[in-house]
Amino acid sequence: MAAELHPVEAISRLGTETAFDVLARAEALAAQGRDIINLGIGQPDFKTPPHIVEAAIKALRDGHHGYTPSPGIPELRKAVVEDIAKYRGVDVDPGRVVVVPGGKVTMFFAILMFGEPGAEIMYPNPGFPIYESVINFTGAKAVPVPLLEENDFSFDAESVLAAITPDTRLLIVNSPANPTGGTVARAEFDKLVAGLEAHPQVAVMSDEIYSRMTYDEQEHVSLLGYKELEDRLILLDGWSKTYAMTGWRIGYGVWPESLVEAATRLAVNCHSCVNAPTQFAAIEALRGPQGSVDTMVAAFDERRGVIVDGLNDLPGVTCRTPGGAFYAFPNITGTGMDAHTLQNRLLEEAGVATIAGTSFGAYGEGYLRFSYANTVENIETALGRMRDLLTR
Ligand SMILES: Cc1ncc(COP(=O)(O)O)c(C=O)c1O
């Protein structure tokens, strides 16, 4: 007899990350012999620097094959707080750091901790799709914070504060942002933090996974720098983007004192710990030479110029200059196509993989996300192919 399974209803509310679907489609087309330029996937096109790889190999050779403490090996948690002191100028107790398998896990845990029917969670839209997906999974109401082009894809603190209700439990912010490359200015964060004083029930999760990728000498403004938020801020950061380590699966959260135990329990219940050699590699990443990060960010900066200028030259396309991350988010309404149609036509007819803005939420209609983690040559070829398609 065929099985009749009854998974919980919440599973049907989980969304996905279209980037992985587009990647699979692009790879399938490439396997058929098509020449595909992938500007879809959000990961550095650089390899993890060799000294970091060597640290993992050494850890394996040295016999680090077992479980580690669930929130991370003590030396790594120390290295994380040293890094926070260096780049954010803030002193944090290593006991607040919980190392997890990727940046995503901190967001999953934070949303699980605050989401349930009746609760409201505010999240950036367009934004990283997993926020909305997991909020829906928990049964909480997903309340979008619109990130609009006319605000350079930042938010307006007054509107955010005005949307808070007594049921709001968690506010998610992400600067520099995926998919827009937008950054939030210090003045806007100042206003937000001051206004949150009146809403002590609201926790804040600041996704700063792109913290080291800002351009034009712009400082990265970390919400960890606001003492007023200390007892309600969850900081999300990690190694995936900064050290080109997306496939290693490691990230960290800095939790308020009152939530560290809950985060650690979720870790114990879920994955026990991050694999040991990766944790050793992560120590080397933070404490070792940072030249490779600078080289990678300089390369992204050059490509940012190429792609933004090139997109602005295309008929029907306009593109703001992103201040961070490695994404451009052009307005494509002038092409007469919606985001999904243009995404599909670019992939199928021009061999250029991009992601429709709607994959990042309803406010993404009219935009496409381009990851410029690709060579200048490929970006230029892709722009040429787009021009051919749009002038056909
Ligand atoms: C805004 C944002 N947060 C978190 C993540 C997840 O990072 P990780 O691969 O470390 O889980 C990503 C990855 O694309 C991201 O764009």
Image (cartoon, rainbow, N blue to C red):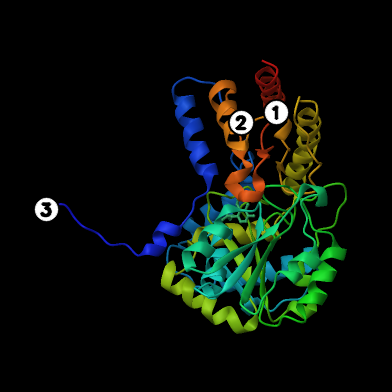
> Please, is residue 171 above or below residue 178 in the view?
below
Q: How crowded is mark 2: few (under 14 residues within 10 Å), some or many (20 or more)?
A: many
> Please, is residue 100 above or below residue 152 in the view?
below
Q: Which mark is residue 159?
A: none
Dot 2 corresponds to which residue? Answer: 342
SS type, badge 1:
helix
Name the residue at 57% across, 70% down.
Answer: 110
What amino acid does circle 3 point to? Met
Q: How crowded is mark 3: few (under 14 residues within 10 Å), some or many (20 or more)?
A: few
Alpha carbon separation for disc pair 1 and 2: 9 Å
Position of 139 compared to 339: left or right? Answer: left
User: Do callouts 1 and 2 mark residues in contact (Cβ within 8 Å)?
Assistant: yes
Dot 3 corresponds to which residue? Answer: 1
Please state which of residues 11 and 206 is positioned toward the viewer in this rendering. Answer: 11
Dot placed on the residue nearer the N-terminal end, 3 or 1: 3
Dot 1 corresponds to which residue? Answer: 335
Q: x, y percentage for residue 161?
A: 75, 71
